[in-house]
Image (cartoon, rainbow, N blue to C red):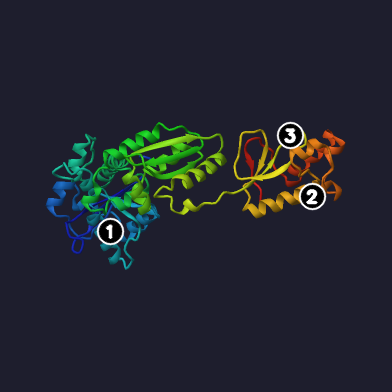
């Protein structure tokens, strides 16, 4: 946050007599820069009356040619903040031009522009009026370091109001807000506040959420690892969101959720509900295809490996999802051939007769020999070979 004291109001014909800045991080001033500057001319009486700086005080101070490099080192690549940026940056750029150096190119933030958009009820947005409005201590007014610190305190209050009233929290959004037209800086509507309150009450668990209109029709269905965090992300920093998402929030009036045990279950539930309800803002996912899984029925006496499109809480082992039905069938067939797992149905197994696959040497024929222990050992080999972690009623990823 920078402030300058000058010999007059026009940068083209006047000079800087004091330059100060404070580094503002995390709501606190962490570093300071302050230096009187020899303007190589006398200081007008009216300036002395305002600042207390006299010509004699500047006689032995360094000229701008020595001060500017120190200030630029202090500034680095940070955002330059000032109350009335046009004035302060105008003088800094004029001094740089006299030194045959390019103007400042860093990002800039004007607290005066912010105040004009945030505090419309105040008749004046000058630094003195804002200090009074926020009831701040204001030592060393009209000296560069004092005013830089005062502007930093005002900035802290304005940023707090931006976050609380306008949902503006990121640096990108703050820089953009200062240039918005007054019409676009109105406070968020009450309906958005209610949605945020609903989001704050959501569980921090996996699940599926749904934005709905006032009449209950579904606008958008999504899945989340953390329902509260995900839904809140849709409702915060709307200025940086895509137009489609801003339109979604504009029409939404409430949020409903369905919790799941795992993120994968949320993914599958999301897919089914999108295809069932075809929400307006899920255009791409309305055509989402079922992704099959491999299912190992470990609760069966002689488990089989099959393919399925859904997960069930049946104690079986699931692996996937796989890229498509053809790929799933291929993987299942390769595993059955390699480990000689049975492919017959339960009725054939109970009859106790050898099937075609047993005759071909592709099955260990548990129906005939009834060696459950030997077959169980064979069944446990596929997950080991695939290097997959076995989890009941959930799925292990597999590339196929």
In the image, is 103 to the left or to the right of 356? left
Residues at circles 3 and 1 in contact by the CB criterion of under 8 Å: no
Cα–Cα span, label 2 and label 3: 19 Å
Categorize mark 1 by other alpha carbons within 10 Å: few (<14), some (14-19), many (20+): many
Circle 1 SS class = helix
Q: Position of residue 220 (x, y in %)?
A: 41, 45
Residue under pointer 3: 300
For the point 20% across and 41% down, which residue is it?
130
Whether residue 109 can be seen here: yes
For the point 47% across and 46% down, which residue is it?
274
For the point 31% across and 46% down, which residue is it?
250
- Residue 337 marker: 2
Residues at circles 2 and 3 in contact by the CB criterion of under 8 Å: no
Cα–Cα span, label 3 and label 1: 81 Å
Circle 2 SS class = helix
Q: Position of residue 280 (x, y in %)?
A: 39, 49
Whether residue 143 can be seen here: no
In the image, is 123 to the left or to the right of 226? left
- Residue 207 marker: none
Residue under pointer 1: 92
Which of discs 3 and 1 lies nearer the camera? The answer is 3
Categorize mark 2 by other alpha carbons within 10 Å: few (<14), some (14-19), many (20+): some
The answer to which image quadrant residue 70 occupies is bottom left
386 vs 57, nearest the viewer: 386
In the image, is 43 to the left or to the right of 28? left
């Amino acid at each position: 946050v920078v402030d300058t004291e000058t010999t007059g109001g026009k940068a083209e014909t006047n000079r800087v007599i004091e330059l100060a800045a404070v580094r503002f991080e995390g709501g606190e001033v962490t570093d300071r820069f302050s230096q009187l500057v020899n303007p190589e001319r006398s200081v007008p009486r009216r300036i002395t009356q305002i600042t207390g700086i006299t010509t004699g005080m500047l006689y032995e101070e360094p000229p701008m040619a020595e001060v500017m490099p120190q200030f630029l080192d202090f500034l680095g690549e940070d955002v330059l903040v000032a109350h009335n940026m046009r004035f302060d940056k105008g003088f800094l750029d004029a001094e740089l031009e006299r030194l045959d150096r390019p103007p400042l190119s860093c990002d800039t933030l004007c607290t005066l522009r912010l105040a004009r958009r945030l505090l419309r009820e105040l008749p004046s947005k000058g630094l003195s009026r804002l200090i009074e409005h926020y009831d701040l201590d204001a030592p060393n007014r009209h000296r560069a370091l004092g005013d830089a610190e005062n502007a930093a305190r005002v900035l802290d209050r304005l940023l707090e109001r931006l976050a609380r009233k306008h949902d503006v929290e990121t640096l990108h959004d703050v820089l953009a807000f200062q240039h918005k037209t007054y019409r676009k800086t109105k406070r968020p509507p009450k309906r958005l506040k209610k949605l945020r309150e609903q989001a704050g009450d959501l569980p921090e668990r996996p699940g599926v959420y749904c934005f709905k209109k006032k009449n209950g029709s579904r606008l958008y269905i999504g899945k989340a690892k953390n329902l509260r965090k995900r839904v809140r992300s849709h409702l915060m920093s709307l200025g940086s969101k895509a137009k489609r998402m801003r339109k979604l929030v504009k029409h939404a009036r409430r949020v409903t959720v369905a919790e799941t045990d795992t993120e994968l279950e949320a993914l599958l539930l999301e897919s089914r509900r999108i295809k069932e309800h075809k929400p307006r803002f899920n255009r791409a996912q309305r055509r989402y295809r079922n992704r099959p899984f491999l299912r190992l029925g470990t609760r069966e006496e002689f488990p089989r490996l099959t393919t399925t499109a859904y997960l069930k809480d049946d104690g079986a082992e699931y692996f996937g999802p796989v890229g498509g039905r053809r790929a799933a069938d291929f993987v299942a067939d390769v595993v059955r051939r390699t480990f000689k797992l049975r492919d017959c149905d339960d009725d054939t197994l109970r009859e106790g007769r050898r099937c075609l696959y047993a005759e071909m040497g592709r099955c260990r024929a548990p129906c005939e020999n009834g060696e459950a222990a030997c077959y169980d050992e064979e069944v446990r080999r596929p997950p080991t070979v695939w290097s997959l972690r076995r989890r009941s009623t959930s799925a292990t990823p597999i590339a196929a």
